[in-house]
Amino acid sequence: MNLNSVVEVKRPASADEIRQWRDGYAWLAGGTWLFSEPQDATDTLIDLDQLHWPALEASSAGLDIAATCRIAELYRFEGPAEWIATPLLRECCNCFLASFKIWNAATVGGNICMSLPAGPMISLAAALEATLTLWPRDAAPREVPAVDFVTGNHTNVLQRGELLRNIHLPARALSGRFALRRASLTQLGRSAALLIGTRSVHSDDDLLITITATTPRPLQLRFDRFPSANDLRQAIDARIPADSYFDDVHGTPAYKRHLTYYFAEQIRAELARPAKPAQPGVRA
Ligand SMILES: Cc1cc2nc3c(=O)[nH]c(=O)nc-3n(C[C@H](O)[C@H](O)[C@H](O)COP(=O)(O)OP(=O)(O)OC[C@H]3O[C@@H](n4cnc5c(N)ncnc54)[C@H](O)[C@@H]3O)c2cc1C
């Protein structure tokens, strides 16, 4: 839609050009949300496109994803064979309520900054224990764990004018096993539940379960010893009070609570099974 309140679009070549932030400014990434509804409080868009940040940079330390990386670019990423969690990137792209038109415009950073409970890039970043690099205006960059970035439905830790620059997925997490479960009330609809379990390949006992969409913000259950079904259920109860599940048109809190137990146990059972031996040249 046309944004009638917008009178200027800035296209900086460097984020440093925007030192003074004022009410009415908004960073523009893919624009898929910004242009989907009126933005009466916004008069100036600051387009991130001309910053030309490299979308994806793989190294021995892990994968750096620029905030401006398009969903379609992430979907096409091929990691080294030892990064057996690489298929999770695609699986999370498939969790959007979105057509290819959205994928070609929407960015990873835009999805994280939207901070919706059903933001699949938030689920991905939290599950793979990402570190986010934030660029405040007129202060040194800072880093936050992805799981702590979202604070509630459509709220996060970004300060006024602060820019999300980078999402770093560590090689250790990319080298681990994973299991994903998702439910939506309609085919290709917005997620009512999106749970991801991860387990490192070098430990017999660990398990990390990341719960998203059923709760307003991501929550994680970390086990140093592989839990029984009963341990897992108790950990969910201890972490998520029954009245704190997310209530919206995509599912009632009772339904989302049920899905949380159901999927967490499915993930636990799947990751309890021994890993399939890797075949040369074939990704697990
Ligand atoms: C048909 C349709 C389906 C959708 N399905 C989903 C869905 O399933 N799940 C979901 O979560 N969302 C969904 N959305 C909402 C939205 O499109 C996505 O969240 C998308 O990923 C936003 O990315 P973008 O790059 O287009 O962000 P924009 O629309 O450009 O920006 C979104 C917000 O983030 C801010 N922002 C963007 N980048 C940065 C940055 N680097 N640093 C700081 N602030 C920044 C902007 O100022 C704005 O407030 C959908 C939208 C549509 C139209």
Image: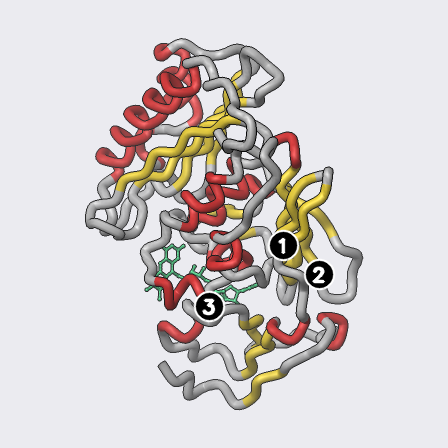
Label 3 CA crowd tier, 10 Å (few <14, some 14–19, many 20+)? some
Judged left or right of residue 254, residue 223 is: right
Identify which residue is drawn at 37% across, 68% down: 101
Residue 228: % across, % down: 40, 9
Q: Quadrant of residue 80?
A: top right
Instruction: Please tell me which of labels 1 and 3 falls first in the chain.
Output: 1
Residue 56 numbered tag: 1
Judged left or right of residue 215, residue 6 is: right
**Of circles 2 and 1, which is in front?**
1
Q: Amino acid at mark 1?
A: Leu
Residue position for label 3: 105
Residue 186: % across, % down: 20, 49
Judged left or right of residue 88, residue 68 is: right
Residue 155 can be seen in this image: no
Numbered circles on residues, count: 3
Judged left or right of residue 145, residue 140 is: right
**Of circles 1 and 3, which is in front?**
1
Label 1 CA crowd tier, 10 Å (few <14, some 14–19, many 20+)? some
Q: Assess mark 3: CB under 8 A from ligand 1?
A: yes
Ligand 1 quarter of the rendering: bottom left
Circle 1 — which element?
strand
